[in-house]
């Protein structure tokens, strides 16, 4: 035990020359005495687990207050020591951290009454309450889970599976969302080992067989890059990037690639001193090797929501071997490994202005609110999975402000990301200058403008359109205010985290719809600029289904399709006219793609079409003669340019010989 504690002190002395050793020795003595006689299932003294958790926190360069709380993290839950006694010994800060970790684990209800999903949901709520008050709680809990995963083999098999699944579903995602890559990778690999032992063993053996060959390739590539960067006077270090077993397994499963395809891609990282040097290094790389089209991402200019910054590019070497390269500064490299811990201001004993850290803390507090609003346990878990999963859609306001959204986000999600009032009053959106349905899936690079109306209120079906927790919560809150949803059950206020500070409404990318705009968006029988008036009884707005009725003066009146006044009044069917808004109209187009015989060509076609936001209603593959095959599909086209974009994109896929339209009726008969 003393040897293990000595290792902890050695780690701290390496990272902090002036840490409070007296505090940590006291924390160790108290924890050791409290856990005296307790052992783990492995037979080792329980205090070893507490020291291991503290070492994991120390390796992340956290402050001694957090490390002391790590040593003491189980004394309230697993010993006779009370929170009051702990507070008397160490003060309120450490006692509060330990109490926060304890509350995550404590469920005041017989566990046999709860399903696994219900237990996870309750634990998540407790975790977010404690974390929103002090983010160090989740850092201690993650360190605790990491050491438990390292020593999981002594538990019963069913318990091992359950804990591993929860780790993969929740803790890996939280580590990822907080940007702590080193913990994420290790948690993933441990969970993979326990959930899929056969695949894990096979993967480990294959990687070991490839290691010597890959190390030779990497060494040669690193030396070559070192020389080229030095010639260009770019101060940098070049290192090989490890490939973790679970990430290899995921690539193989999700991309349909075999092991050799994944492992044959070399990966290196260039670490510089300045941002300018990053772009200079990129210039060197692209001068030496041609970049692979579509494989470049600049997360320095547009950081990920978990604070990650780096330039990603894939180049093709002279031997035909692809090379994945990340370029970042030393500070970015540390943030990539340590995430929120690299920005933790408590280390200095005082708070400082750190927008990245503030953003993370605000997200954690909002996360509690989103989860509170979810009802069924499955909905709680789904909300968390969505919100802690990495966002990867970057869109712009018309003035160039960047908004990061989750994959699958819609204009409604964007509207609520701007402000709740903008979301509530949203009636439509322009994307890249054209009207789109509210269900449209936004893509990286889209320029989004929201149209609003003072008379608009949220609809129940909006809950099926949005994907973000924030939007879903705000919609439900407003629907409850309007009496369209049952009120939430009251919660224990003392456990609630501090509320996020209210934001001022932003008008960037938002336009109030006036009468002139409504007329511009109106289509009657498919025609623009029709002389029409909008019925006062129902005030139809973009986003509403509408219908026209021919009158003597001024000509046509536009009603909402569900307008009670219109529906309940006897009308001449011959005077009813089709009406819609710009962006609501769509037509079906049939396409035939002629293919040669090439491995993975269908997968490549699917990948090429994915960013195009197509609504495909039918697809069929047909083998032909002489090595020629056909892939037919029907898609809904929002505008007349859609077919040209689809054809251009598909003709660039290797193996595609021809793309042409076919009558929809012909393809529909083959369904």
Image (tube, rainbow, N blue to C red):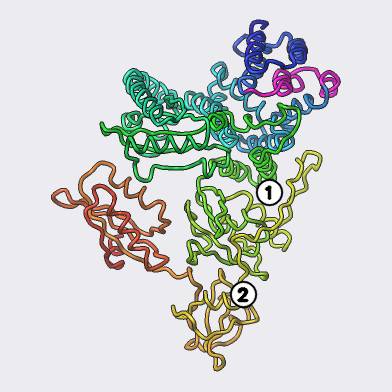
Q: Residue at x 46, y 25 (%)?
A: 237
* Res. 242 visible in picture: no
Magenta stretch encompasses residue 476:
no
Q: Position of residue 548 (x, y in %)?
A: 52, 82
Magenta stretch encompasses residue 82:
yes
Secondary element at tag 1: helix
Label 2 packing within 10 angstroms: few (<14), some (14-19), many (20+) = few
Label 1 packing within 10 angstroms: few (<14), some (14-19), many (20+) = many
* Residues rendered magenta in the picture: 61-90
* Dot 2 or dot 1, earlier in sequence: 1
- In the image, residue 432 sits, relative to residue 525, either above or below, namely above
Q: Nearer the viewer, residue 668 or 220?
A: 220
Q: Which residue is mark 1?
A: 373
Q: Position of residue 505 (x, y in %)?
A: 69, 58
Distance Cα–Cα, label 2 vs label 1:
34 Å
Residue 22 picture quarter:
top right
- Taken as a whole, is the magenta stretch helix, strand or loop? helix
Q: Nearer the viewer, residue 534 or 649?
A: 649
Q: Nearer the viewer, mark 2 or mark 1?
A: 2
User: What label sits on residue 514 in the rendered view?
Assistant: 2
Secondary element at tag 2: loop
Q: Position of residue 285 (x, y in %)?
A: 37, 35
Q: Residue at x 28, y 49 (%)?
A: 653
User: What label sits on residue 322 in the rendered view?
Assistant: none
Q: Position of residue 626 (x, y in %)?
A: 13, 50
Quadrant housing the C terminus = bottom left
Residue reaching furthest to the bottom: 552
């Amino acid at each position: 035990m003393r040897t293990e504690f000595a290792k902890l002190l050695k780690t701290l002395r390496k990272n902090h020359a002036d840490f409070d050793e007296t505090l940590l020795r006291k924390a160790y003595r108290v924890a050791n005495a409290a856990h005296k006689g307790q052992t783990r299932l492995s037979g080792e003294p329980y205090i070893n687990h507490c020291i291991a958790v503290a070492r994991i926190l120390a390796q992340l360069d956290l402050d001694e207050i957090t490390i002391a709380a790590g040593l003491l993290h189980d004394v309230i839950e697993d010993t006779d020591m009370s929170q009051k006694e702990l507070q008397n010994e160490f003060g309120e800060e450490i006692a509060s951290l330990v109490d926060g970790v304890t509350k995550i684990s404590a469920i005041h209800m017989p566990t046999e009454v709860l399903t696994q999903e219900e237990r996870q949901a309750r634990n998540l709520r407790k975790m977010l309450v404690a974390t929103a008050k002090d983010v160090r709680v989740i850092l201690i809990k993650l360190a605790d889970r990491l050491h438990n995963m390292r020593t999981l083999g002594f538990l019963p098999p069913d318990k091992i599976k359950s804990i591993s699944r929860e780790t993969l579903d929740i803790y890996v995602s939280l580590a990822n969302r907080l940007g702590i890559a080193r913990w994420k990778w290790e948690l993933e690999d441990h969970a993979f080992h326990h959930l899929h032992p056969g695949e894990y063993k096979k993967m480990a053996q294959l990687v070991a067989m490839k290691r010597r060959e890959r190390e030779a390739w990497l060494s040669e590539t690193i030396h070559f890059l070192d020389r080229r960067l030095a010639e260009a006077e770019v101060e940098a270090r070049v290192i090989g990037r490890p490939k973790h077993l679970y990430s290899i397994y995921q690539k193989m499963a999700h991309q349909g690639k075999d092991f050799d395809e994944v492992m044959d891609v070399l990966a290196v990282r260039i670490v510089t001193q300045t941002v300018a040097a990053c772009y200079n290094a990129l210039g060197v790389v692209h001068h030496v090797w041609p970049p692979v089209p579509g494989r470049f991402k600049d997360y320095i200019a547009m950081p990920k929501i978990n604070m990650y910054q780096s330039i990603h590019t894939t180049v093709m070497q002279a031997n035909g071997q692809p090379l994945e390269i990340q370029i970042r500064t030393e500070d970015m490299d540390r943030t990539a490994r340590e995430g929120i811990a690299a920005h933790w201001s408590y280390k200095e004993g005082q708070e400082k202005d750190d927008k990245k850290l503030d953003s993370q803390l605000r997200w954690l507090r909002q996360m509690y609110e989103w989860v509170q609003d979810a009802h069924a346990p499955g909905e709680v878990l789904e909300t968390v999975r969505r919100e802690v999963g990495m966002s990867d859609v970057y869109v712009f306001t018309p003035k160039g402000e960047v908004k990061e959204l989750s994959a699958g986000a819609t204009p409604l999600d964007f509207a609520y990301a701007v402000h709740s009032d903008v979301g509530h009053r949203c009636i439509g959106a322009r994307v890249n200058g054209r009207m789109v349905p509210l269900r449209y899936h936004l893509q990286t690079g889209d320029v989004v403008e929201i149209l609003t109306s003072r008379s608009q209120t949220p609809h129940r079906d909006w809950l099926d359109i949005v994907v973000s927790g924030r939007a879903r919560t705000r919609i439900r809150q407003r629907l409850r205010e309007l009496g369209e949803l049952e009120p939430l059950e009251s919660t224990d206020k003392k456990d609630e985290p501090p509320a996020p500070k209210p934001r001022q409404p932003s008008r960037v990318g938002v336009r109030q719809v006036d009468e002139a705009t409504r007329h511009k968006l109106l289509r009657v029988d498919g025609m623009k600029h029709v002389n029409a008036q909008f019925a006062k009884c129902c005030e139809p707005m973009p986003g509403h289904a509408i219908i026209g009725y021919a009158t003597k003066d001024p000509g046509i009146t536009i009603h909402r399709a569900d307008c009670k006044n219109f529906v309940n009044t006897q009308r001449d069917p011959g005077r009813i006219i089709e009406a819609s808004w710009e962006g609501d109209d769509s037509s079906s187009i049939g396409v035939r793609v002629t293919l040669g015989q090439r491995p993975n060509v269908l997968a490549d076609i699917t990948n090429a079409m994915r960013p195009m936001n197509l609504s495909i209603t039918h697809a069929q593959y047909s083998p032909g003669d002489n090595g020629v095959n056909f892939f037919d599909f029907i898609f809904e086209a929002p505008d007349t340019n859609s077919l040209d974009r689809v054809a251009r994109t598909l003709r660039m896929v290797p193996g595609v010989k021809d793309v042409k339209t076919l009558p929809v009726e012909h393809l529909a008969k083959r369904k």
